[in-house]
Image (tube, helix red, strand yellow):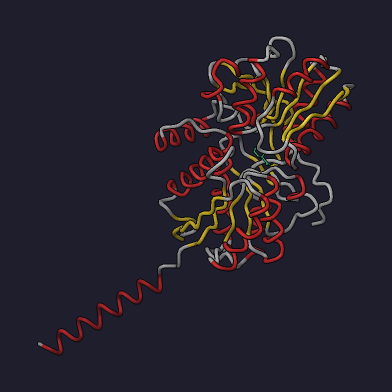
Amino acid sequence: MKAHRIALLAACAMAASLSLAQTPAKLKIGLMLPYTGTYAALGIAIENGFRLFVAEKDGKLAGREIEFVKVDDESDPSKATDNVNKLVKRDNVDVLVGSVHSGVAMAMAKVAKDTGTILIVPNAGADIVTGAMCAPNIFRSSFSNWQPAYAMGEVAAKKGARRAVTLTHKYAAGDESVKGFREAFEKGGGQIVKDLNLPFPGVEFQALLTEIAALKPDAVYVFFAGGAAVKFVKDYAAAGLKKSIPLYGAGFLTDGTLDAQGADADGLITALHYADSLGTPRDNAFRLAYAKTYKLQPDVYAVQGYDAAQMLGIGLTAAKGDITKKAEFTAALEKARIDSPRGSFMLSKAHNPVQDIYLRQVTGKENKVVNVAIKALADPARGCKM
Ligand code: BEZ
């Protein structure tokens, strides 16, 4: 009887250790996003999108369960290097996902490049990340700052605007957005009469709006997102400028913000790689699943988070769940077509989406598609040697 019980216990222990041996360790994802400040809603939407894709795969990517190590980066570049080093060196994350703010993403890209850690950027558009800093282990599921801005510049010139004023937060994303707009606008015969800016994340727009009114341009181009975009659109209307000077923007101006902007956003025209009314079966399914899960409408940030998870899944599957097999991971993504709600896309040689940029107009609390401003637009990836 006693011997029988010992044999049974030994068999149980063996079975338990076998099943342990067959269960791969969880994949540790360092999720570095803003959860406070002007970009907080963007960070939350990215995480929601990411988690939705993982949930659709029964909580696993390439057979591995996921564990998140989360950091609120506060959209503060001065804390970014410390934050990302802690994730890589203290928490030993397998992969980095982040961030929203271009300055933070540049610090992440530097650490990723130095340590060889896989990085997927689910928003920040810093041109340099898929430009001079490009690397085999760095990918972006979102856009470069140049992409929507260039498309908007081309459209503004075609609409007949000749003299434009630009306005943005003074940091990499705003500067590069204005540069992209200028490039296409000048090519189309337009001229920028003044570049205005204010420090990030300030929202004291009054003096700038007074200056715009005095300059009387044909159009204003802005880069603002999140809480600042809400306030700017409201202030532009309250200053009486909406009636007299067309306001154009990279689409972040009206994405994820329309409930708060209300009628002040009606009619605004922007360019972006997503819109609320694509109406494709893929996007409809995504929007329905997102709305059911979070009781919220998705936005471009949710799509980028969802696609970051898809990209991780593709790379990891090719690497048979082993994130250290970086050559396999990279080769798979370089030839993948990513089945995004925005429309399927492939990555450029520099690992940035080559994607359609939609011209959208705000109608009834939606960014409705007017047309495709530029099809399959690839970032020029200036300075990328890969
Ligand atoms: C950026 O810093 O790159 C960024 C922030 C918010 C929206 C879009 C871009």
Q: In the rendering, at what x and y percent does residue 138 appear?
A: 68, 55
At which x and y percent is residue 159?
79, 16
| Res 86 → quadrant | bottom right
Q: Which residue is painted at 84% across and 30% down in the image?
A: 182
Residue 313 visible, this orientation: no
Q: Quadrant of ligand 1?
A: top right
Residue 373 is left or right of residue 91, and the answer is right
Residue 370 place in picture, x, y as percent: 65, 19
Quadrant of residue 236 in the image?
top right
Q: Residue at x 83, y 47 (%)?
A: 382
Q: Quadrant of the C terminus?
A: bottom right
- The answer to which of 320 and 95 lies nearer the viewer is 95
Tell me which residue sits at (49%, 30%) in the image: 284
Q: Quadrant of the N terminus?
A: bottom left
The one of 328 and 296 positioned closer to us in this rendering: 296
- The answer to whether residue 287 is left or right of residue 203 is left
When the figure is inspected, residue 44 is found, relative to residue 349, above or below; the finding is above
Residue 37 shows in the view: yes
